[in-house]
Image (cartoon, helix red, strand yellow):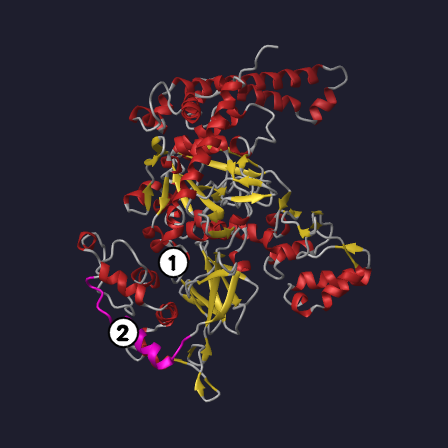
């Protein structure tokens, strides 16, 4: 065992009966043999230092088929750039501490509705300051939840927001030796003869961290919410951005995997195909906010587009505007000073190009991959994982996907230059869709208005319409097989808007990894979330119209998170999760029933138009049987007279049914045949090389004879029945058929 003492700055452990120690210093990362990483870090807004621990096994969040503006890049950005620091405020110290005392000493034994009380694993009567209660359980206790009694929910709603923050701060720093005399450790200064409003702990000002979650519709100001006092932003390594290559492998063929992956029969392994990432830094227009972009654009050899060309005189003027310049990060300040000194034309991260008298909302730059620019982060992540899994240095360390969370772009009804923009804001922060509904979305890949687009519309199957050189059915077939084999849940997160009233930009995208990495593997499964009431199904419903009853196909939206999900999982991030993600955001129809219905109809209409193209151009014949079902329902509302909800149809969308199907077996045979043909071609090429006159010495130098032997052995392997069995659980190969000319 090892212990780390923050005050003594020491890490101590015992080896061979003797105590060993090492000084813990800032700027260093210390790895435990379990893979757990520790570092000492100064608080950005105070003189205090804190120890930060990072788990050895990370959570790979995969964001495939994400439309423009859906948050592909944001999922990998550090939350620290978006965090705002401030004091923990208190009103009237005496009165507020009295309220705090009442909350701490309250009897919570009857807080649950009787039907839920028996389901609790631990008694709710535990005192808030009890060591048997975690800070998380206190956050949950004081967050509205449908499992609570009406009286308890009314009590929660009666607690002022700043009082709640004080309760959580006391719980965070409480020590058992304080007993009931905790109040004496907290105080405020006297300012101008009156009690101040900044809470202190043993004479040290407490600092709170706050996060933006969207904008206020009326004022346009930020909606900021306090993070938990013990919250530490996740350490992230960017694994992908726009272009990713991936394979699917049976779990049994990947050695040294921990138990976290036992729930998956097969796993997806992906590889980033880009050296530079095409970024649109939306928040860089706010000086000092997007620290990563300012650091990138302050570097050398940067490719940018849609930034304003700034000459020496204007750059000098900007550097003298203290209310602008002083907010920028140090790298950008130095960049501007260097530009003034060297002259010529340059850019500033907060100054996009002027187009038609306005600043463009589509500035772009090529960012060197973060894992390449800062290899230490990736190295430490891999080293921690190697230690956690006990992987020898000679063996590869594989990082399978742990969760699939696509991104969607939503927009409210709008108008641009006389052109109406249809609403597409029907999704709440996180949705889950079963495969038929998920692939209706993937086929259409409809996007709302964003700085990258001129309006809502389809980007082509899997968002690859502009880039595909083959029929989209091949990609869709592969993706569908992949999802069935792995069993990953089809989750998605919202960007842009949630309903017509809540503009969230990428604030939800940034939060998703923070929530997901704090969930246990079983908690990330749709089955668990549905069983616990943390996902609710959205059903079709009828409305009255002048023409009669009309069905709104709301079931296309799948499932959405509930207040229970918010209390349980967002409660691991926020002090008051129910305020950050409120009921209007969870149920966008409460903001406007008309916009909600219109949005669903627009989505279904876009899906129908996308699917009809497969029938018009004849590529429907290349779709696998399950994809054909999806396309028929999208285009015509049924498949052979059966709806998408028919039990017989749903039963086909399972791993077991696919493995037994002839069409999946044909994929495996096709893969075997192509591997055989490829190896035979390789063998012929090697033999031709060896038989060339005068090439004997060159063949010996290149080891062609050994390569030929290896190719023959590999041909024998892939031609065998055993190889065909080994392919079960993989994608196989799509039996693409080319029409005769």
Per the image, the residue denoted by label 2 is: 102
User: Who's the residue at 45% across and 83% down the image?
Assistant: 189
Residue 312 - label? none
Position of residue 364 in the picture relative to residue 432 (left or right) = right
User: Who's the residue at 18% across and 52% down the image?
Assistant: 115
Look at the numbered disc 2 and give the secondary structure of its residue.
Answer: helix
* Magenta range: 90-110
From what the image shows, is residue 217 above or below residue 69?
A: below
User: Who's the residue at 53% across and 26% down the image?
Assistant: 472
Q: Quadrant of the C terminus?
A: top right
User: Which residue is most to the front?
Assistant: 546
Return the residue nearer the eye: 12 or 358: 358
From what the image shows, is residue 72 above or below residue 723?
A: below
From what the image shows, is residue 95 above or below residue 579?
A: below
Position of residue 249 in the picture relative to residue 280 (left or right) = left
| Mark 1 neighbour density, 10 Å: few (under 14) some (14–19) many (20 or more) | many
Q: Is residue 92 magenta?
A: yes
Per the image, the residue denoted by label 1 is: 577
Residue 21 at x, y percent in the picture = 47, 68
From what the image shows, is residue 338 above or below residue 526?
A: below
Q: Is residue 484 magenta?
A: no
Q: Is residue 331 visible?
A: yes
Mainly helix, strand or loop, the magenta region?
Answer: helix
Residue 739 at x, y percent in the picture = 57, 13
Q: Is residue 250 visible?
A: no
Position of residue 398 in the picture relative to residue 338 (left or right) = left
Q: Quadrant of residue 559?
A: top left
Position of residue 284 in the picture relative to residue 724 (left or right) = right
Q: CA distance from mark 1 to mark 2?
A: 22 Å
Residue 81 at x, y percent in the picture = 55, 59
Return the residue nearer the eye: 557 or 209: 557
């Amino acid at each position: 065992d090892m212990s780390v003492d923050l005050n003594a700055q020491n890490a101590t452990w015992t080896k061979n009966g003797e105590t060993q120690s090492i000084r813990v210093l800032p700027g260093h990362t210390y790895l435990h043999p379990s893979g757990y990483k520790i570092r000492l870090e100064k608080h950005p807004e105070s003189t205090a230092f804190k120890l930060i621990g990072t788990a050895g096994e990370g959570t790979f969040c995969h964001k495939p088929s994400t439309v423009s503006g859906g948050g592909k890049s944001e999922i990998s950005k550090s939350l620290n750039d978006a965090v705002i620091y401030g004091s923990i405020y208190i009103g009237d110290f005496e009165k507020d501490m009295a309220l705090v005392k009442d909350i701490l000493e309250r009897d919570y034994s009857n807080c649950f509705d009787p039907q839920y009380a028996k389901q609790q694993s631990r008694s709710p009567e535990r005192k808030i300051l009890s060591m048997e209660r975690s800070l998380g359980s206190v956050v949950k206790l004081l967050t509205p939840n449908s499992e609570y009694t009406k009286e308890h929910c009314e009590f929660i709603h009666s607690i002022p927001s700043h009082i709640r923050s004080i309760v959580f701060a006391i719980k965070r720093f409480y020590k058992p030796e304080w007993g009931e005399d905790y109040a004496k450790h907290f105080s405020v200064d006297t300012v101008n003869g009156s009690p101040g409003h900044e809470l202190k702990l043993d004479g040290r000002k407490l600092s709170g961290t706050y996060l933006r979650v969207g904008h206020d519709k009326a004022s346009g100001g930020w909606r900021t919410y306090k993070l938990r006092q013990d919250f530490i932003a996740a350490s992230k390594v960017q694994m992908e951005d726009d272009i990713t290559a991936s394979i699917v492998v049976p779990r049994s063929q990947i050695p040294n995997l921990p138990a976290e992956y036992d729930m998956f029969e097969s796993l997806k392994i992906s590889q980033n195909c880009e050296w530079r990432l095409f970024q649109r830094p939306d928040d860089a227009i706010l000086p000092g906010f997007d620290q990563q972009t300012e650091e990138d654009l302050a570097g050398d050899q940067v490719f940018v587009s849609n930034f304003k060309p700034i000459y020496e005189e204007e750059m000098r003027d900007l550097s003298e505007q203290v209310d602008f310049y002083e907010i920028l990060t140090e790298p950008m300040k130095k960049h501007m000073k260097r530009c003034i000194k060297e002259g010529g034309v340059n850019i500033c991260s907060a100054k996009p190009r002027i187009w038609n008298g306005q600043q463009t909302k589509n500035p772009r730059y090529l960012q060197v991959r973060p894992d390449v620019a800062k290899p230490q982060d990736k190295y430490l992540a891999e080293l921690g994982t190697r230690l956690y899994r006990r992987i020898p240095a000679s063996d590869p360390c594989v990082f399978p996907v742990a969760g699939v969370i696509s991104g969607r772009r939503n927009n409210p009804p709008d108008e641009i230059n006389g052109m109406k923009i249809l609403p597409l804001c029907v999704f709440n922060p996180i949705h889950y869709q079963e495969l038929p509904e998920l692939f209706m979305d993937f086929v259409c890949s409809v996007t709302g208005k964003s700085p990258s687009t001129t309006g809502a519309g389809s980007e082509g199957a899997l968002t690859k319409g502009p880039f595909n050189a083959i029929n989209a059915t091949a990609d869709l077939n592969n993706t569908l097989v992949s999802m069935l084999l792995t069993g990953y849940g089809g989750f998605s997160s919202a960007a842009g808007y949630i309903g017509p009233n809540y503009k969230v930009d990428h604030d939800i995208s940034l939060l998703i990894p923070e929530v997901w990495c704090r969930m246990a593997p079983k908690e990330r499964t749709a089955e668990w979330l549905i069983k616990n009431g943390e996902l609710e199904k959205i059903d079709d419903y009828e409305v009255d119209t002048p023409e009669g009853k009309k069905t709104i196909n709301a079931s296309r939206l799948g499932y959405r998170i509930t207040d229970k999900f918010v209390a349980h999982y967002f409660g691991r991030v926020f002090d008051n999760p129910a305020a950050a993600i409120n009921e209007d955001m969870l149920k966008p129809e409460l903001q406007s029933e008309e916009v909600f219905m219109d949005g669903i109809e627009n989505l279904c209409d876009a899906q129908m138009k996308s699917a009809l193209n497969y029938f018009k151009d004849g590529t429907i014949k290349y779709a696998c049987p399950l994809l054909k079902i999806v396309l028929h329902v999208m285009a015509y509302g049924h498949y052979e007279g059966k709806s998408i909800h028919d039990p017989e149809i749903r039963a086909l969308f399972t791993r077991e049914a696919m493995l037994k199907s002839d069409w999946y077996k044909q994929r495996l045979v096709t893969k075997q045949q192509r591997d055989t043909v490829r190896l035979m071609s390789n063998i012929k090429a090697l033999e031709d090389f060896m038989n060339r006159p005068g090439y004997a010495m060159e063949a010996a130098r290149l080891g062609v004879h050994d390569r030929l032997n290896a190719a023959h052995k590999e041909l024998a392997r892939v031609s065998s029945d055993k190889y065909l069995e080994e392919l079960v659980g993989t994608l196989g190969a799509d039996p693409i058929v080319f029409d005769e000319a």
